[in-house]
Image: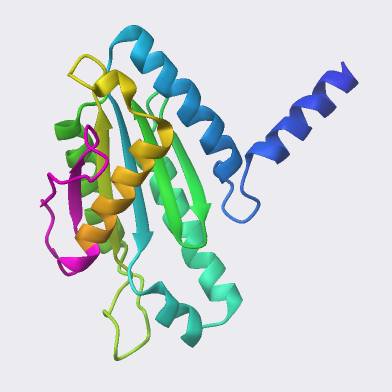
Amino acid sequence: MALERANQRLQRLVAVDTLTGIANRRHFDRVLDRELRRARRERLPLSLIFLDLDQFKRFNDTHGHTQVDEVLRRVARTLDESFRRGGDLVARYGGEEFVVILPGVDSHRAGLYAERLRRRVWRMAIATGTTNASDRITISAGVATVTPQLPGGADITANALLRAADQALYCAKRQGRNRVAMASAHVETAAAERAIGLAS
């Protein structure tokens, strides 16, 4: 019994980001591969939200580590509270980047979920304390969805899905930040991009 508890604790330590308490990148990679295989098998959509904090480098350069870490923890908590369905996974990808895996969720619903999250972070009103950046912490997000039953959908890899979400994130950045952009994961170029969120 003690050995089983120790093994569970060790597995948790390996899977969890120590700063934020949510899943780490290693665990995210494993779950994404598993959920992609399941989506193909069950012919269900799988959506991915890739997001980061806008102009966070300026905030990081202005404030100490304690304040920066607290902001990352608060955003992680908001993410964790926003995605509570069984199967959803929220993870810290690295630095100020976060990812959300949404099994069984199509692109329209995933875009709505990402927009709701963007608004929640905006309403947190975490002041940046700088004059050059926005007056509060905001996020930009890219959403990509794979639909196995569509032509080419079953061939999309985890890397291609992640790349599509990442390209959509940078589309949101180019369009002015504090918004959500959608990507077509069925082509690796993510050509079908559109912004759906604007500053509240």
Q: Residue at x 28, y 52 (%)?
A: 167
Q: Quadrant of the N terminus?
A: top right
**Is residue 178 covered in magenta?**
yes
Q: Is residue 31 left or right of residue 177?
A: right
Magenta-colored span:
173-200
Question: Where 198 sits versus 12, above or below?
Answer: below
Residue at the limit of the structure toward the top, as seen here: 42
The answer to whether residue 29 is left or right of residue 141 is right
Q: Residue at x 29, y 44 (%)?
A: 164
Who's the residue at 59% across and 76% down the image? 65
Give coordinates of residue 139: x percent, y percent: 30, 61
Q: Residue furthest right?
A: 2
The image quarter containing residue 131 is: bottom left
Residue 4, horizontal then vertical, whole percent: 82, 19
Q: Viewer-proximal residue, 32 or 22? A: 32
* Quadrant in which residue 55 is drawn: bottom left
Residue 24 visible here: no
Residue drawn at (24%, 36%) of the image: 185
Q: Quick check: is 5 in the magenta stretch? A: no
Up-down relation of residue 5 to residue 53 (above or below): above
Q: How many numbered markers are drawn?
A: 0
